[in-house]
Amino acid sequence: MQYASAMKAVDPTIKIGAVVTDPGNWPDGVVGSGDTGDWNRTVLSIAGPSIDFAIMHYYPNHTTAADVLQQTKLLAGELVQLRQKIDHYAGPNAANIGIAVTETASNYQSDTQVGGLFTADVYFTALENGVFNIDYWDTRNGMPDNGVTTAPDGTTSYGDGGMISSGNCNSDGVCEPPLNTPFAPYYAFQMLGKVAQPGDTLVRAGSDNALLAVHAARNTDGGLSVELLNQDPATAYTVDLHYDGWTPSTATPTVHSFGSRSTAITTTQQGSAGRQVVPPYSIVTVKLRPSATNPVATALSAPAAPTAGAVTATSATISWRPSTGGPVTRYAVYQQFGTNSVLLGDTTATSFTARNLIPGTAYTLNVLATDTNGYLSLPSAPVTFTTGTPATSTCAVTYDISGGWGSGFVASVTVTNTGPDPITGWTLAFTMPATTESVSGSTWNATFAVNGQNVVVTPAAYNATLAANAANSASFGFIGNQTGANPPPASFTLNGTVCTTTYSP
């Protein structure tokens, strides 16, 4: 904090970052001897007022090439949890703190197509989930003595973490390609620019094939770019493409491809806007033009990034700066559901209050402006918020994560009856919000029934009665398993009533 103060005294525009741990990965959740909290809790609560961004490194756990390519699916949840920790601990400055991933690469065969596929996927996944900056490790790294392995497509991995070859040899006489020869991540990084450039808008995309990752961007020239990543080393996939709210031209699209064993990106006209063949272990970017049936483009700019305020258990107010470029007749507010959007409401003002929301639920909204011809602008940047629990209720729950080790955590729960009548025989229900966490078989002081992510807790004989007016409480807990993020449950219900909830995550 002294360093940040001294630097900004010389240059007020300088930005200061503090290192945080990646939620759900060691050493996240580890509390050192004599400390009162883990690293993120301690650093953010102390340095929050002085920093501009949080620094995260992303090197996911893995056991195989297939595993490391699937790990990027966990990044979105980990970033959401990190944002929750920033909001929870960093104080009034929390909303101004960005997230930068200042190191990432596949830490398994990164100099092969495994690393290329990982790079293409992780960059867009991070940017789609609010990261403002992401850096690759590194340009040149060199070849270790014991790093030579064979990738799933039969190519050689030299164990080099660089984007281009250092040209060295190991003690066994095995040598890398000549100095500055590009490895696959180099071309994967180039392919990012085929999808999106500054000023373009990332849009949601998804796949029903676990081995096919998809990313997309609406380009400033009116086109749409779709990147398809085939993570299967042996099988080509015929992909049927579907579009929501946008109609492509029937002309044969331009397709950029980088495949296994390739030494350059190829560009051809092939397939159609509705169907493409994606070869094994390849990165394919389809460049699409809009159909003449699409609405005429509007001169309106996208509304400025909205902010959420006055968030309660059942409502939230979002506000934004107006669009420019012409008169606006109304603003439409859309709620995002996976790859789909649903109109939540509209207004002529530059704020909107969403009501009848579900307590303890995450919401993502975009705002679009409508011009005098009825045409929509591009969407604003998304705003995400989580509704809370009721300010007053007849029950209260405290949820505390008291320790963790990267693949598991200890959770303690306390439930209190704050109502005027005693409760004998209670049922507490909650949902684990991430598929990456679950209740293990180790529980205490209560009986747990688990169905997927849904958990129902019933008491032991000795804590089955909850006296009225908070005269006593029941405490119990469990060991949680995790393979990524482990955010706390958003809400708890006691005998069907939503409780006031406090967290110490």
Image (tube, rainbow, N blue to C red):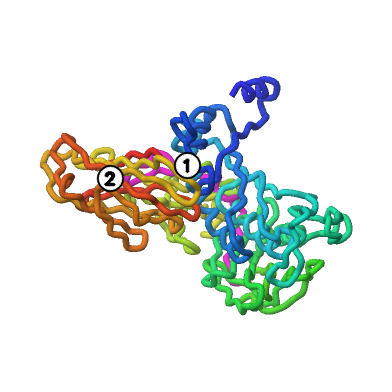
Question: Is residue 151 shown above or below 369?
Answer: below
Judge left or right: residue 255 versus residue 85. right
Question: Is residue 3 shown above or below 490?
Answer: above
Q: Secondary structure at mark 1?
A: loop
Residue 191 lies in quadrant: bottom right
Q: Secondary structure at mark 2?
A: strand
Q: Where in the figure is residue 37, as x and y percent of width and height?
A: 45, 34
The residue shown at (71%, 65%) is 113
Judge left or right: residue 342 versus residue 156. left
Q: Earlier in the sequence, mark 1 or mark 2?
A: 1
Residue sitting at the far left: 421
Q: Between residues 379 and 323, which one lies in front from this camera angle?
A: 379
Judge left or right: residue 326 versus residue 139. left
Q: For the residue carrying disc 2, how many other residues have a C-alpha within 10 Å: few (<14), some (14-19), or many (20+)?
A: some
Question: Is residue 32 shown above or below 236?
Answer: above
The residue shown at (66%, 77%) is 234
Q: Where in the figure is residue 55, as x and y percent of width and height?
A: 61, 40
Which residue range is magenta in the image? 292-318
